[in-house]
Image: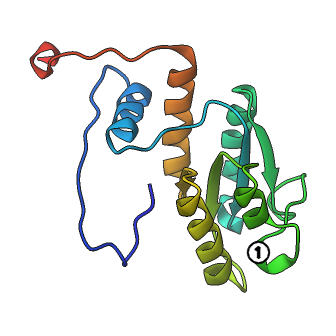
Amino acid sequence: MILGPEMKSTGEVMGIDENFGTAFWKSRLAAGQDLPGEGMVFLSVKNKDKRNIVFIAKKLSDLGFRICATKWTGKVLVNKASEGRPHVVDMIKHGQIQYIINTPSGRNPKVDEAAIRSGSVQHKIPYTTTLSGAQAVVNAIEVMKNGTLRARALQDYY
């Protein structure tokens, strides 16, 4: 989900279930935002997030995703928009990226963040800007890959 100051209206959705991953998955579906079940995940995180992104990247890899990252975030070299071509926006346009985790920082964070965010919106690619949000998405993807949703009446929970 991408929120920004340019929003002129908001809406709310709710997902409820017996575990967080399923509830979060339901909320994403209700908001019209599909989660990928496979493909490439792009990572670019600020320095303070680098240690913790390892656990999220490992889980995504265990779920069958391929990981690519900027040179300071990961082992696979993919350039930010300001680092030259080919860069992540090119990969987005060519359908090579299915999910983005970006907690930007550095000299050109606004330029890179705007280009990546714009590309993700234009090509309907899920985009997360916090590690807690990324962990929630990973939980939902894990549930999605291992099960099915079932609808229950709200009264059934009480």
- Residue drawn at x 50%, y 49% is 132
Q: Is residue 129 visible?
A: no
Dot 1, crowdedness within 10 Å: few (<14), some or many (≥20)?
A: some
Q: How many numbered circles does the render carry?
A: 1
> Where is residue 69 drawn, in percent x and y?
80, 56
- Residue drawn at x 81%, y 62% is 70
Please, is residue 54 above or below residue 20 in the view? below
**Relative to residue 156, is residue 143 drawn left or right?**
right
Please, is residue 96 above or below residue 147 in the view? below
Q: Is residue 71 visible?
A: yes
**Relative to residue 40, is residue 152 drawn left or right?**
left
- Residue drawn at x 69%, y 35% is 60
> Where is residue 47 drawn, in percent x and y?
71, 67
Q: Quadrant of residue 2?
A: bottom left
The residue singled out by tag 1 in the image is: 81
| Applied colour scheme | rainbow
Quadrant where the image shows the N terminus: bottom left
Please, is residue 66 above or below residue 53 in the view? above
Tell which of 128 and 35 is nearer to you: 35
Quadrant where the image shows the C terminus: top left
Tell which of 101 and 114 is nearer to you: 114
> Where is residue 52 drawn, in percent x and y?
67, 50
Tell which of 104 and 52 is nearer to you: 104
Tell which of 89 and 50 is nearer to you: 89
Q: Amino acid at mark 1?
A: Ala
Q: Quadrant of residue 19?
A: top left
Secondary structure state at the residue bearing disc 1: helix
- Residue drawn at x 40%, y 26% is 22
